[in-house]
Image (cartoon, grey):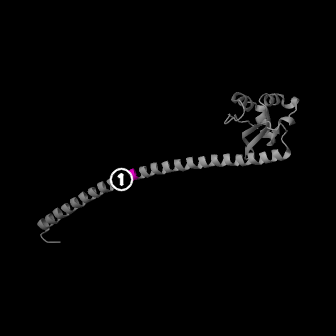
């Protein structure tokens, strides 16, 4: 699968430059995209993900949690060692995985909300534009109707005038009224 480029959003307890090196490590994003599961430092095999293990060791990262939305990696939470120095237990990881799932849902909801908001604003603008266009067309139509009404009235008057002239001519030439 194609891997997205990720940017560092927030660092707490890590040096920012170290966070950048971990985020730029495609092996991390590819692994998390492929498995969809948390990755602990202890699980890494040096032969398979050596660069990733080195990067995690250098910045003291112990756990990477994927943020997934519809089976797509949208972010990563990277945690350092526990304050106690202990490894993350199965229960710790399950709790953190549950929290990362909730964070993923919140991020996706925020993204969808922004998308709906943008669509709504665009729709409102489009409605206003089309309303303005229809008003302009309506004004043009009203002007043409008035113009055509004037032309018809003028034609009616001309016809009436000609009819009167014909009636006069008929009276004069034939000598009787209609």
Among all residues in the image, which is located at the extreme front? Answer: 84
Image quadrant holding the C terminus, namely bottom left
Choose top left, top right, bottom left or bottom right for residue 8: top right
36 left or right, relative to 144: right
Majority secondary structure of magenta residues: helix
Among all residues in the image, which is located at the extreme bottom? Answer: 177
* Residue that mark 1 sits on: 139
Q: Position of residue 165 (x, y in %)?
A: 16, 62
Q: Position of residue 84 (x, y in %)?
A: 82, 38
Q: Is residue 135 above or below residue 11?
A: below
56 left or right, relative to 166: right
Q: How many marks?
A: 1
Q: Position of residue 39 (x, y in %)?
A: 82, 39
Q: Is residue 168 above or below residue 124?
A: below
Q: Residue at x 29, y 58 (%)?
A: 149
- The crowd level at tag 1 (other Cα within 10 Å; few <14, some 14-19, many 20+) is few
Choose top left, top right, bottom left or bottom right for residue 43: top right
Q: Position of residue 86 (x, y in %)?
A: 85, 38
Q: Is residue 58 above or below residue 1?
A: above
Q: Relative to the observer, which residue lies in front, 24 or 149?
A: 24
Q: Secondary structure at mark 1?
A: helix
Whether residue 137 appears in magenta in the rendering, the answer is yes
80 left or right, relative to 178: right
Image quadrant holding the N terminus, namely top right
Q: Give the magenta part as a residue range.
A: 135-140
Q: Relative to the observer, which residue lies in front, 33 or 143?
A: 33
Whether residue 8 appears in magenta in the rendering, the answer is no
Choose top left, top right, bottom left or bottom right for residue 152: bottom left
Q: Residue at x 83, y 41 (%)?
A: 88
Q: Residue at x 30, y 56 (%)?
A: 146
């Amino acid at each position: 699968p194609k891997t997205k480029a990720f940017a560092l959003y927030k660092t707490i307890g890590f040096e920012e430059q170290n966070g950048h090196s971990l985020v730029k490590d495609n092996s991390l994003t590819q692994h998390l995209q492929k498995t969809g599961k948390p990755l602990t430092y202890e699980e890494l095999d040096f032969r398979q993900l050596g660069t990733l293990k080195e990067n995690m060791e250098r910045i003291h990262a112990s756990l990477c949690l994927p943020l997934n939305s519809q089976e797509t990696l949208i972010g990563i939470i990277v945690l350092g060692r526990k304050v106690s120095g202990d490894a993350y237990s199965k229960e710790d990881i399950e709790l953190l995985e549950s929290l990362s799932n909730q964070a993923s849902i919140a991020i996706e909801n925020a993204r969808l909300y922004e998308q709906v908001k943008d669509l709504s604003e665009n729709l409102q603008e489009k409605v206003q534009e089309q309303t303005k266009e229809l008003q302009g067309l309506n004004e043009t139509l009203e002007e043409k109707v008035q113009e055509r009404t004037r032309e018809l009235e003028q034609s009616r008057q001309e016809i009436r005038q000609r009819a009167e002239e014909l009636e006069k001519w008929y009276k004069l030439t034939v000598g009787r009224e209609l």
